Amino acid sequence: MEKKFFHSFFLPYLCTFITFFKMKKSFLYLGILAFLISCSGSDDKEAKLAQLKKNRDQLSIEIMELEKEIYPEGNLKTMTVRIDTLREKPFNHYIEVQGRIDGNENIGVSPRTMGVVNRILVKEGDHVSKGEVLAELDAQVLKQTLNELESQLSFATEMYTKQKALWDQKIGSEVQYLTAKNNKESLDNKITTIKDQIKMSNITSPIDGTIEEIPIKVGQMAAIGNPAFRVVNFTKAKAVADVGEAYTNKIQTGDQVQVFLPDLDAEFDRKVTFSSKYIDPVNRTFVVEVGLPTNHLVYRANMIAVLRIKDYNNPASIAIPQNYIQSSRDEGQYVFIAIEEDGKKLARKRYVKTGITYNGLTEIESGMTDGELIITAGYKDLYDGQFIDYMQ
């Protein structure tokens, strides 16, 4: 009787106390765990991520084992996937840089002597020929000097003619004859020099082309070395780009280039016509030039040109979208392929070695061969050996 009374009266309270004690102990463990997690900080995020991935892989293995136990042989859970056949194709990698359009002849024309601008004989947009006078500088002093020298030359020439006639008749001294001759020749040379200086006061075009810019005005002082005109010849245009020195050994003259002109909505294949061997010490770049075709397109100086320079080519490569490739911390990168074993379709994990990536495609260096079936949709929830079916 007393035993029954104990079980009926004290036992419920005892169980409640034990349960409360266990819960309190659990709360204590949870509190300690939360404290440890909060103290771990951001430094342990990578370790935590690695542990979660490891747990995921372990869960995948456990799921596979449980499904084999739950479902009888031949009646395992089947996943529906989409597949694609691998084919060897050319794989190219490009270096993409933004450049500008320039003329093969784009020249800033400077005066050859200093002087005030008297006349400008052309305007922007005019087509000019080589040697054509673009502007005239003030050369009044030189012209006055020329007039004086020409007057002196006239007198010296007359004296030389008379002395020569006398000398031919053996009259007079040789010194008188030679002096008259020297005076005449000296004035001839001075006049030639002055005429050249007067010509230098004219600013002339060194090439055939179009006047694109005239930064000088009438009445301004033109100085040597300061461009007074810009003449551009676009009969032969080119795209110019500055490329980082990291690509020095990857870009050579003759490399294939895809040129895209966004302003003209035009694209064409060309070749590198010039790759500089000089690295700019300021921005650590070198110049690359690509000749542009002569066609109906109207090129303009400094128009944007996007250059995609081919720096890698594999004529027979397997390349797949980058998102098909999954990673395991312990085992590396892998994809899922579809195979048939004993008349059943299975998903198999295939580890691969990847190469470079361009435009969303990654080159597969090893691990896959031409003709295999790669799973392109539904691969996220697969495990090695799972039964699959193909999407229609």
Image: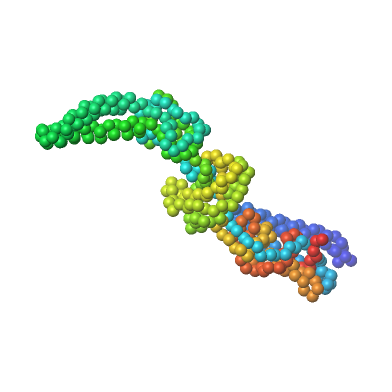
Quadrant hosting residue 204? top left
Can residue 381 be seen by looking at this rendering?
Answer: no
**27 shown above or below 109:** below
Quarter that holds the C terminus: bottom right
- Which residue is found at the position 47% from the left and 30% from the top? 122
Quadrant hosting residue 153? top left
Residue sitting nearer the eye, 94 or 366: 94
15 lies left or right of 352: right
Please state the horizontal and vertical placement of residue 320, each as a whole percent of the image.
67, 61
237 lies left or right of 34: left
Please state the horizontal and vertical placement of residue 389, each as a whole percent of the image.
80, 65
- Which residue is found at the position 18% from the left and 34% from the top? 181
**75 shown above or below 145:** below
**116 shown above or below 12:** above
Furthest toward the front, the residue is 169
Please state the horizontal and vertical placement of residue 48, each as a whole percent of the image.
63, 58
Visual colour scheme:
rainbow
Furthest toward the right, the residue is 1
Quadrant hosting residue 161? top left
**267 shown above or below 318:** above
99 lies left or right of 323: left
